[in-house]
Every structure is written in structure tokens, then in C-alpha cells.
Amino acid sequence: MNRHDGDQENSSNSACKDLILEHDADVVILTHTNLNFQLGGIYKRISTQEMPLRHDGIVYKEGENRVSIYTKYPLKNKVKTYDDHNSICQMLDTPLGNLNIYGTVIGANIELFESDLLEQKDDLERIEGAICYVGDYQMSFVKPFLPNEEKVKDMQAFADSQKMAILTADFENLMSHVTISKSFLKGNTTKLDLFEVPSHISNKEIIVVEIKKKEIKKQVNNPLHGVKLAYMLEKLVDHYGWNELGDRIRINSFNSNPGFKSSLKFLRKTDWARKKVEDLYVETFVE
């Protein structure tokens, strides 16, 4: 899945559209966009309501809205959310099963952050089935914690209580996030990447999450067969050191108080990060 924030001034910019379409995502979630913006083709769109010209102390232009979901998948039930301006939820019929996409902006006006988050937690608790909770959280889960450590820990505890995984929590300076029900991820492989966006298009990154069924392959000519993750990490740290390893694989476990125990814990539960370690091990010691 692909997520991109188009800024308000470029809502109909063809460069923005081209940048999104080159990822060929099955689901696209945009925040702070415009109802005039279309991806076209086979994409269906579900959007929050058009913003009034003035709302929550913010001045908007005609046609602006906060969240739009575009998808190639068949639409199923639309789920009512607490606020038709800040959030939208649509169930999709995906090859991996039904998935409720909950697109959001939390606290467009920072004074409303706590009330928005509280209402959205209520929404998430009552939604039945797997959920993808995605959008502008206005939170950073890496030091310095934003808006503060207490709210970050509270959000992490809530995700755990709902059996959800915050896939983007380990990225520095990232305020937009993707959180998905663990039941939807179980038995599947997950790959996550960030892509920078030219500043004239947006001040946000594109977050791309790929989820697919895990393939079972015969271990023929597999250079990693029988090689334990702990051994790979030890070899890479011996070869590169933590600093260079953190530059090559940019995850918080390698860059902030790095250690084997915390790094292995993160890698064992994060397929995309483990894959980067495996690829670097093969590139360094096998090829």
C-alpha cells in the first residue's frame, strides 16, 4: 500500500499524480488534498467531506478535504466515523481478506489533538475485523518523542491492546504512520519503504507498504539456508561497526543506543528490516 501527502497548493498537479502512479499501488491514502484531484483509471475514490472555508480555526480553499482513499479493490461496507471531516473508513475486499482502511488526520488544529485521538480510539475499538489505521498522526515514536513521550507510550499501548502493529514506528522524524491489525499480517510478508518527495509537490514522504502471502520455496542454492539472524548481525557489526551499519540500514535500533538484543528483537518481528540485513550480509560475505 502506498501513502502520500499532497500539499494543498499542488492538489491537481500532474507531477503529484505521476509520482503516485509510478508505484502502482492497490490502495492509496492521501491527506490534505482536494476533491478535484483524481488518479483516474480503475481507481475508485472515497473521501472525507469538503472542508468549510473556515473550520477548526483553519482557512481552507474551495474543494479541499483532509483524507481520500483510492483503491483498485472492490468496495464493501463503509464504516461510520466520529467526524466526516477528519477521518473516513472503508472496508475493502482484498486478496488477503477484508480490510477496513481508516484514513485520518489527528489534530489538524493541534489544540484538538487529544479530543481527535480519543474519538478515533473509540472508532477503532468498535470496528469489526482487520484494520489499517493510516494518516497524519502528528506523532513521532522515536526520540525526541512528539508531541511527548507520555502520548507516544499511550498510543503504543493502545495499539498493543487492539493487537495492531505500528509498522512505521521505527523511522526518525516521521509524523505520518501506518498501523495494521496483526491478524492481517500473520502468515504474510511485509515490506516497507520510504520515498522522498520533491519539496514543490509535498513536504511529506511517500510510505509504501507491500503485504503478500509468504512463499514457501525449496532451499536450493540459498546462501542464507542454515545461517541464523544473530550470526548475520554479529558478522555485519564486526565488519562495518554500528555507525556504518546504521547508515546503510536506517532503522532506529542501529542508530539510537544500538545493541544486539534490541536489534534482534526488532528484526525478528519486522520482515522488511530483516530482509535488508539479509541482503547486506549476502552482498558483503557471499557474492
Image: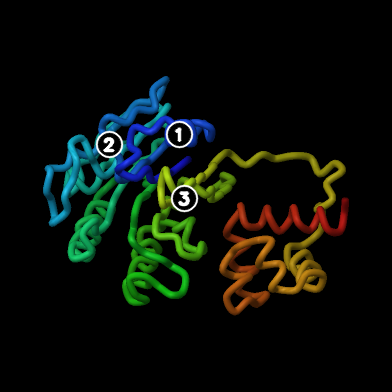
Q: Nearer the viewer, residue 244 or 79?
A: 244
- In the rendered view, does 176 fall on the left or right side of 192? left
Counting from the top left corner in percent of width and height, residue 77 is at 27, 32
Which mark, by number, is residue 205? 3
Q: Which residue is mark 2?
A: 34
Question: Mark 2, residues whose alpha carbon is within 10 Å: few (<14), some, or many (≥20)?
Answer: many
- In the rendered view, does 285 fall on the left or right side of 1? right
Q: Which residue is mark 1?
A: 15
- In the rendered view, does 7 fall on the left or right side of 195? left
Counting from the top left corner in percent of width and height, residue 203 is at 41, 52
Separation (CA) of disc 1 from disc 2: 15 Å
Q: Nearer the viewer, residue 181 or 279?
A: 279
Can you tell which of label 1 and label 3 is closer to the viewer? 1
In the displayed structure, 89 sits above or below 93; it is below
Of the image marks 1 and 3, the number of the one nearer the N terminus: 1
Separation (CA) of disc 1 from disc 3: 15 Å
Helix, strand or loop at mark 3: loop
Q: Given the image, on which type of amino acid does mark 2 rest?
A: Asn
Of the image marks 2 and 3, the number of the one nearer the N terminus: 2
Q: Given the image, on which type of amino acid does mark 1 rest?
A: Ala
Separation (CA) of disc 2 from disc 3: 18 Å
Q: Residue at x 23, y 41 (%)?
A: 65
Counting from the top left corner in percent of width and height, residue 193 is at 56, 49
Q: Nearer the viewer, residue 55 or 157?
A: 55
> Mark 1 near mark 3, Cβ–Cβ under 8 Å?
no
Counting from the top left corner in percent of width and height, residue 58 is at 17, 53
Helix, strand or loop at mark 1: helix
